[in-house]
Image: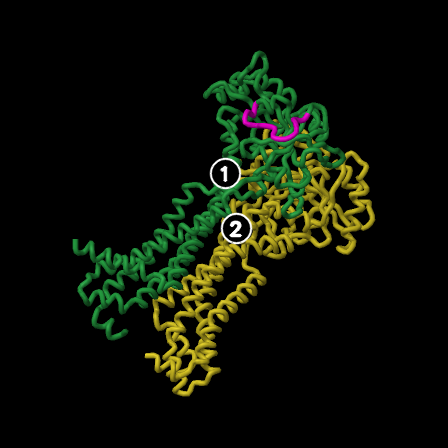
């Protein structure tokens, strides 16, 4: 019990005397806060991108493209193939109507508002069924495009990031003029970075004849993908690949996400090492500054253990406060921050930074490790200070 | 005791503290060197790789749309145009779909005329001009995949289907090319346009983009405008820009990600330096009474000032110089290991100058206040403080 009381007393004394060593404390705190902020900011970018792209796909929807094309942009499906696919098993039918949407995916030029630079934007051509299939899509302003007209509906994120997409305005792509008639929302997914228009109009603008690039189809069960594959395997005209939309989008988001993580984690570790060196220095300085106080305690009978715990607590309190500060800064400045970058399909993807609970835990663990190691060695030194020598040196 | 020895003795009086300070400076410059080197390599890479008199002409709606083949000869006959070549993006990948390669179908003779910075063995050049399945491999790609001259290489395309209905196209490595400047990226592959054009199932007689050589960089703008005007009323309109602007625009599309990483790490860099600087200042402040003793012994003000500054310089260099060296090695290794994904990376002269400037600034900022204080120490007060 004595050791408990001693420890509590020393710890209280340490924490209370912190303001006297305010600069040392601030340096440690800031070092830790910066590590936490940098790590979380970079990784929140990866998490946000992943959420936007990989989160866009459903497991009950298939995306069908030409075999080996990997992305809608590269794919091409003839009208014959589209008609064959409409007969495929595994696709939900309402009445006689297969719930399948043939679509086009092309690139148009836009201007990014924040930089004024020209960027590639995805333009998706689809028939009314395409909108029906995406159940989470709502028109938040204006109306849907009409078939046969040069009309666009613009994703919420695209309108926010790129210039000239307010409802009622007109846009020029090459020789054709388009009317923006509405804004749609799609649950924050990657679709909100797109422009949508009538498939037939896009076909004629891009000289695509009657061809499409992909088919989205509602699947009627867990084995539907196999059914469609088997059906296509029996018909040499159907040189296609089928995958769930969820698989397709997670494969699209993977390269960038692993690139950012590949930069983010090593960066965080190197920074943490640098900050650890700073924290160790600060804590040693702090022990040196309190040398007289520490040896006095030891001289009047306090044990080395309570001294050790006292210093450790100081380091951990600072680490905890640094984490808190870092997390707060990241939340305020980075959570929900909207950015856009070039995705796997050569088009802009708009996404929001996302500070996830896992990130907070990871950053907290790293900060705690800095606190523990940064406190341990100085605490050990304090606990071992030989009383007589220390008095002599003071 | 000479000056240098005294400075070193002072800096190293607390070995652990010196080590920790040097180490945190080391980490800061390591981060700066790697990320800054990456960024500046990208910029410089674009600069050197882009010919001063080369223009790129693409479809006005977007660069993925093809141009009719007839545009090649129309542009060639225009005023101010010295040469024209064309290329098509093959959408190639090797072995698995994730292993994407930059492969271009080009017109062999005019392409090599316009890209005269490429260094190609004579026999490889001959094969490239005569054999339509010839594949010219950039040095970095040859190193990455271990490809050798004469080897058969199947490359798949995620865009083009050949007459056999397959996505796989067979090539024979004709040779390996390098560039006359090691900073120019060579992580791509070239093969004759004819092979693609005769083999593909759709898109015959169209090209992806034109590369136009002007007679002089001074008339780039006029020629670019003239080309776009020429096709202004055609069904396919064009957009022409200098090669540099074209490449830059593409890189800049990654935009926000680079900017955010750069600003966040920039902040981190300076914070670590702040922390290290704080320790360095503290280390000198502790020695007030010793400096008073030196002064009593007859050390002049100027000498004391210089000594303290030099101590800061020494500590900074000890951390920063090895860090920049390691960053350089790391970049070299990374760009070799990830040829085709990352560009040629190196720490260029600009980066070296900048980092030297930051080192000097750090040393001065952390040294000058304590040095000033040390210089103005009043011997009586300092020694009497005890």
Residue A152 drawn above or below residue B51: above
- Residue A375 as seen in the image, left or right of residue A187: left
- Residue B192 as seen in the image, left or right of residue A188: right
The boundaries of the magenta stretch are: A133-145
Query: Residue A243: where, in percent of width, then height?
Result: 51, 27
Name chain A's colour: green
Question: Which of the chains bears the disc numbered 2?
Answer: B
Q: Residues within 10 Å of mark 2 (few under 14, many from 20)?
A: some
Alpha carbons under labels 1 and 2: distance apart: 17 Å
Does the magenta run of residues contain A135? yes
Quadrant location of residue A82? top right
Query: Residue B144: where, in percent of width, then height?
Result: 52, 47
Q: Residue at x 68, y 51 (%)?
A: B244
Query: Residue A136: where, in percent of width, then height?
Result: 54, 27
Q: Residue at x 72, y 36 (%)?
A: A171
Residue A143 visible? The answer is yes
Which disc is residue B261 wearing? 2
Question: Which of the chains bears the disc numbered 1?
Answer: A
Residue A281 visible? The answer is no
Name chain B's colour: yellow
The residue to which callout 1 is attached is A50
- Residue A339 as seen in the image, left or right of residue B28: right
Q: Residue at x 71, y 27 (%)?
A: A201
């Amino acid at each position: 019990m004595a050791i408990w009381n001693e420890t509590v007393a020393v710890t209280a004394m340490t924490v209370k005397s912190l303001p006297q060593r305010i600069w040392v404390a601030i340096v440690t705190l800031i070092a830790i806060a910066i590590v936490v902020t940098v790590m979380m900011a970079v990784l929140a970018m990866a998490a946000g991108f992943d959420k936007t792209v990989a989160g866009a796909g459903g497991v009950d929807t298939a995306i069908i493209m030409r075999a080996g094309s990997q992305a809608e942009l590269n794919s091409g499906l003839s009208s014959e193939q589209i008609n064959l696919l409409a007969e495929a098993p595994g696709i939900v039918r309402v009445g006689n109507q297969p719930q399948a949407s043939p679509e086009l995916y092309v690139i148009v030029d836009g201007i990014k508002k924040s930089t004024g630079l020209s960027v590639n934007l995805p333009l998706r051509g689809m028939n009314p069924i395409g909108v029906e299939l995406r159940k989470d899509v709502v028109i938040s302003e204006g109306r849907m495009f009409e078939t046969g007209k040069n009309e666009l509906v613009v994703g919420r994120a695209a309108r926010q990031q790129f210039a000239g997409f307010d409802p009622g305005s007109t846009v020029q792509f090459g020789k054709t003029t388009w009317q923006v008639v509405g804004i749609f929302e799609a649950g924050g997914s990657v679709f909100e970075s797109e422009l949508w228009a009538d498939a037939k109009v896009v076909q004629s603008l891009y000289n695509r004849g009657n061809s499409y690039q992909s088919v989205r189809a509602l699947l009627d069960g867990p084995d539907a993908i196999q059914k469609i594959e088997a059906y296509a395997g029996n018909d040499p005209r159907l040189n296609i690949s089928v995958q769930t939309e969820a698989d397709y989008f997670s494969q699209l988001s993977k390269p960038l996400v692993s690139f950012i993580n590949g930069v983010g984690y090593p960066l965080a570790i190197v920074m943490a090492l640098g900050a650890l060196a700073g924290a160790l220095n600060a804590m040693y300085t702090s022990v040196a500054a309190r040398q007289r106080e520490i040896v006095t305690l030891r001289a009047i009978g306090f044990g080395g253990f309570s001294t050790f715990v006292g210093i450790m607590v100081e380091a951990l309190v600072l680490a905890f406060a640094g984490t808190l500060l870092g997390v707060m800064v990241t939340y305020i400045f980075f959570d929900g921050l909207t950015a856009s970058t070039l995705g796997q399909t050569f088009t802009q993807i708009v996404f929001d930074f996302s500070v996830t609970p896992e990130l907070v835990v990871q950053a907290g663990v790293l900060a705690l490790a800095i606190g523990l190691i940064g406190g341990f060695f100085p605490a050990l030194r304090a606990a071992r200070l030989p009383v007589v020598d220390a008095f002599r040196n003071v | 005791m000479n000056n240098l020895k005294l400075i070193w003795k002072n800096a190293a009086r607390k070995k652990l503290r010196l080590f920790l300070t040097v180490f945190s400076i080391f980490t800061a410059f390591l981060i700066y060197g790697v990320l800054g080197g990456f960024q500046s390599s990208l910029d410089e890479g674009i600069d050197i790789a882009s010919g001063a008199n080369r223009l790129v002409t693409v479809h006005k709606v977007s660069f993925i749309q093809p141009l009719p083949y007839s545009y090649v000869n129309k542009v060639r006959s225009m005023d101010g145009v010295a040469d024209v070549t064309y290329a098509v993006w093959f959408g190639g990948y090797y072995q698995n779909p994730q292993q994407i390669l930059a492969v271009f179908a080009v017109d062999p003779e005019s392409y090599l005329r316009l890209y005269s910075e490429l260094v190609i063995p004579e026999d490889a050049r001959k094969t490239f001009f005569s054999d339509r399945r010839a594949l010219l491999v950039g040095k970095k790609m040859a190193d990455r995949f271990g490809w050798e001259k004469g080897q058969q290489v199947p490359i798949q395309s995620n865009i083009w289907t050949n007459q056999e209905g397959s996505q796989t196209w067979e090539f024979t490595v004709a040779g390996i090319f390098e560039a006359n400047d090691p900073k120019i990226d060579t992580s791509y592959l070239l093969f004759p346009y004819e092979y693609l054009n005769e083999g593909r199932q759709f898109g015959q007689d169209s090209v992806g983009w034109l590369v136009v050589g002007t007679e002089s960089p001074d008339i780039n703008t006029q020629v670019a405008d003239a080309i776009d005007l020429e096709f202004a009323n055609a069904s396919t309109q064009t957009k022409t820009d200098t090669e540099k602007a074209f490449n830059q625009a593409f890189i800049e599309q990654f935009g926000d990600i680079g900017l955010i990483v750069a600003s966040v790490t920039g902040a981190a860099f300076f914070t670590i330096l702040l922390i290290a600087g704080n320790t360095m200042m503290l280390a000198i402040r502790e020695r007030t009474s010793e400096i008073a003793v030196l002064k009593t012994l007859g050390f002049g003000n100027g000498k004391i000032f210089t000594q303290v500054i030099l101590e800061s310089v020494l500590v900074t260099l000890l951390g920063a110089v090895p860090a920049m060296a390691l960053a350089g090695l790391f970049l070299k290794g990374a760009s070799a290991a990830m040829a085709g994904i990352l560009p040629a990376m190196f720490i260029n002269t600009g980066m070296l100058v900048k980092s030297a400037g930051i080192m000097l600034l750090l040393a001065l900022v952390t040294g000058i206040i304590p040095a000033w204080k040390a210089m103005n120490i009043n011997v009586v007060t300092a020694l009497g403080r005890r």
